Amino acid sequence: MGKYQLDYKRMKAVSKYHEKLKPTQFDKKQQLEKIRTAYLEKKQKQADTSTE
């Protein structure tokens, strides 16, 4: 074994650690829906304040 080689048990532990740190996948549809609802709410508030 080389100086920096890990045994199988340690390799699993390292991969598990890196899985935790990996950012969650970006969901484009969910992001667009979130932006859309925020926009519609803002538009509705503007319409309410402009009619008063």
Image (cartoon, grey):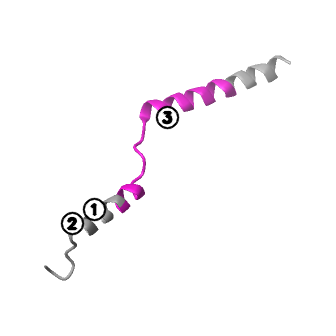
Depth check, front residue: 26 or 20: 20
Task: Write down the residue under mark 3.
Answer: 31
Please identify the quadrant where the N terminus is shown. bottom left
Please identify the quadrant where the C terminus is shown. top right
Circle 1: residue type: Lys
Return the disc, 1 or 3, that comes first in the chain's sequence.
Answer: 1
Looking at the rendering, the stretch of residues picked out in magenta corresponds to 17-42
Circle 3: residue type: Gln
Return the disc, 3 or 2, that comes first in the chain's sequence.
Answer: 2
Depth check, front residue: 39 or 20: 20
- Residue 37 bears which disc, if any? none
15 inside magenta stretch? no
Query: At x 21% / y 66%, what residue is drawn?
Result: 8
For this view, does 34 lie left or right of residue 12?
right
Task: Write down the residue under mark 1.
Answer: 12
Judged by its main secondary structure, the magenta piece is: helix
Q: Position of residue 39 (x, y in %)?
A: 62, 28
Residues at badges 1 and 2 in contact (C-beta under 8 Å)?
yes
For this view, does 29 lie left or right of residue 48?
left
Residues at badges 1 and 3 in contact (C-beta under 8 Å)?
no
Q: Disc 1 on helix, strand or loop?
A: helix
Mark 1 vs mark 3: in front: 1
Report which quarter residue 20 is drawn in.
bottom left
Task: Write down the residue under mark 2.
Answer: 8
40 inside magenta stretch? yes
Relative height, residue 43 to residue 6 (above, below): above
Structural crowding at the residue carrying mark 1, measured as other residues with C-alpha within 10 Å and reported as few (<14), some (14–19) or many (≥20): few
